[in-house]
Image (cartoon, rainbow, N blue to C red):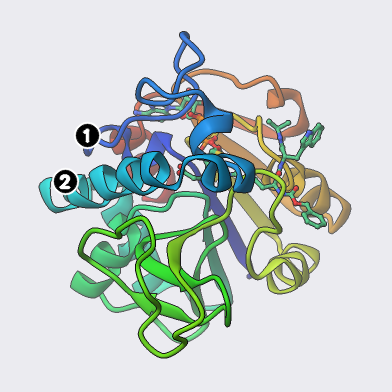
Amino acid sequence: MNLVVLTGAGISAESGVPTFRASDGLWEGHRIEAVATPEGFAADPALVQDFYNQRRRHLAKVAPNAAHRALADLAARWRGDFLLVTQNVDDLHDRAHVETPPAPGFELIHMHGELLKARCTASGAVYYWTGDLETAHASPHHPQGVLRPHIVWFGEMPLAMERIEAALEACDLFVSIGTSGAVYPAAGFVQLARMAGARTVEINLEPTQGARLFDEGVYGPATEAVPAFFD
Ligand code: BJW
């Protein structure tokens, strides 16, 4: 049986990573357009680098929770293909899977990039990066380039889309966890899974605006609902 799981900010909320769509419409005090668009980066690179430097530093203070661990345990025992697609740029899934190595057939994709990576604006080369990025941080191997966060901003193409769409077309079970379904293309994955004939399940604190697109909804905190669902 082929499984695709999509995760969003809600799965990391109980680890202490803030979600995006708070009621004030601000992103940790910033307008979304100022910090999560290529135009925002061009207008004020120092503000954007600082915003991501702070979030990168914060990762050292958080740890995977019971929901991340339940998916890692599932990946260790799943017989079949299991694609875990996360919209999250934190490394909490990665850390959970280091503790519990997955079975063959498992793959993790960070479709919106990763805080712990930096990308050269000239060559596109991607580097593992745990420290701060300066405004015009020279790229290690491409002197003409500067490093930017390896993050997919609005208007940019999410990563590995062909691989994700192929998995959705072949999936039997699609589970969406802790995402508001407000951002495309991830918000459209449930429809692709339905077209493939998959059973579709939403796990969230509360029904999302797209809840009717799912066959089933499981509502509660991810640290309780995810382990219970996959038990
Ligand atoms: C819990 C919980 C607990 C809380 N337990 N649950 C109009 C219509 C359609 C599309 C568009 C449009 N205008 C523009 C677009 C495209 C745009 C888009 O979708 N915009 C929307 C706002 C409408 N999309 C893009 O631009 C994407 N690219 C693209 O489409 O490319 C096409 C292209 C084609 C050709 C050439 C080039 C391009 C890119 C999207 C990039 C998104 N990036 C971000 C920022 C990353 C950087 C950063 O982190 O700073 O990614 S946006 C932000 O939202 C972040 C997230 O990954 C993403 C999704 O958010 P998520 O995870 O769902 O979080 P929340 O906060 O929204 O929801 C949390 C949920 O958890 C809630 O439901 C809670 O209830 C729940 N929860 N606690 C369980 N304990």
Gap between marks 1 and 2, in whole Å?
6 Å
Quarter the N terminus occupies: bottom right
Contact flag, marks 1 and 2 (Cβ < 8 Å)? yes
Residue closest to the eye, 214 or 9 = 9
Q: Say what secondary structure mark 2 lies in.
A: loop
Residue at 25 percent across and 63 percent down: it is 96
Q: Position of residue 79 (x, y in %)?
A: 50, 78
Q: Which mark is residue 25?
A: none
* Residue 121 quadrant: bottom right
Q: Nearer the viewer, residue 141 or 59?
A: 141
Judging by the rendered image, the residue that carries numbered circle 1 is 16
Residue at disc 1, secondary structure: loop
Residue matched to label 2:
62
Farthest right residue in view: 195
Q: Please, what is the three-letter code of the amino acid marked with disc 2?
A: Val
Extreme bottom residue here?
141
User: Up-down: is 84 above or below 225?
Assistant: below
Give residue 187's position: percent from left, percent from top. Answer: 70, 40
Residue 188: image location, x then y, percent: 77, 43
| Mark 1 CB within 8 Å of ligand 1 | no
